[in-house]
Image (cartoon, rainbow, N blue to C red):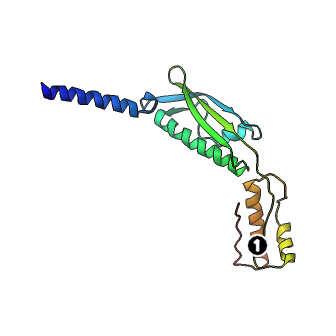
Amino acid sequence: MRSAVICIVFAFCFLFTSNLLSKNNVNTNIMLKVSDLKIDGHKNIKEREIRDVMQIKEGESYKSYILEYLIGSDEEIIKEFYRKKGYFNALVSVDMNYKKGDEVEVSVNIEEGECCKIVRVDIIGEMTDEERKRLWKQTDLDIGEEYSEDIVNASELDIFMYLAEQSYIYADVYTDV
């Protein structure tokens, strides 16, 4: 009798804790359909651009554990996307709300903050001021413009190619933001 009570208590504890450990108390193998994908708070970045970088797509179905993984992944992807556009302090949260049946709504909430501007560019190394001016002319950067990682990387490549054409084969060009 005593062992039967212990087995029942053990079984109850196992079922209770496994139910708690399962996030949102959902079977991880069920398919969930993203019936609605809402993006709020974007002011300076187009919604289409945000949707394009996301892995979760409206109307698609995912196993619940994959969808939960993609929610965390998309949150990081959107933060990185904003960082590359100069929004270093952007706050992003992605949440999932259950609707009827196997449908869920995914909500993306964004607080963009201010876009950083380029206030100074230092070209360092052993060179004359004239050489520094020639390198500056190779960039597409303007003081006061909004930061864009794409423009910074392109300018970095332009300087590298210019130096290679000038036979500086060991030149090292990098950006520190």
Residue at screen point 43% across, 28% down: 25
Residue at screen point 62% across, 41% down: 54
Residue 12 image position (x, y, % from top left): 28, 27
**Quadrant into which the N terminus falls:** top left
Residue 81 image position (x, y, % from top left): 67, 47
Element type at mark 1: loop
Image height of 151 relative to 172, above or below: above
> Is 137 or 176 nearer to us in this picture?
176
Where residue 55 sits, quadrant-wise, is top right
Tag 1: residue type? Ile
**Quadrant into which the C terminus falls:** bottom right
Residue 124 image position (x, y, % from top left): 76, 72
Where residue 129 sits, quadrant-wise, is bottom right
How many marks do you count on the picture?
1
> Is 21 or 155 nearer to us in this picture?
21
Residue extending furthest top? 100
Q: Residue at label 1?
A: 124
Residue at screen point 51% across, 40% down: 69
46 relative position to 104: left or right:
right
Residue at screen point 51% across, 29% down: 32
85 relative position to 4: left or right:
right
140 relative position to 70: left or right:
right
Where residue 173 sits, quadrant-wise, is bottom right
Residue extending furthest left? 1
Image height of 1 relative to 115, above or below: above
Image height of 97 relative to 50, above or below: above
> Is 27 or 20 nearer to us in this picture?
20
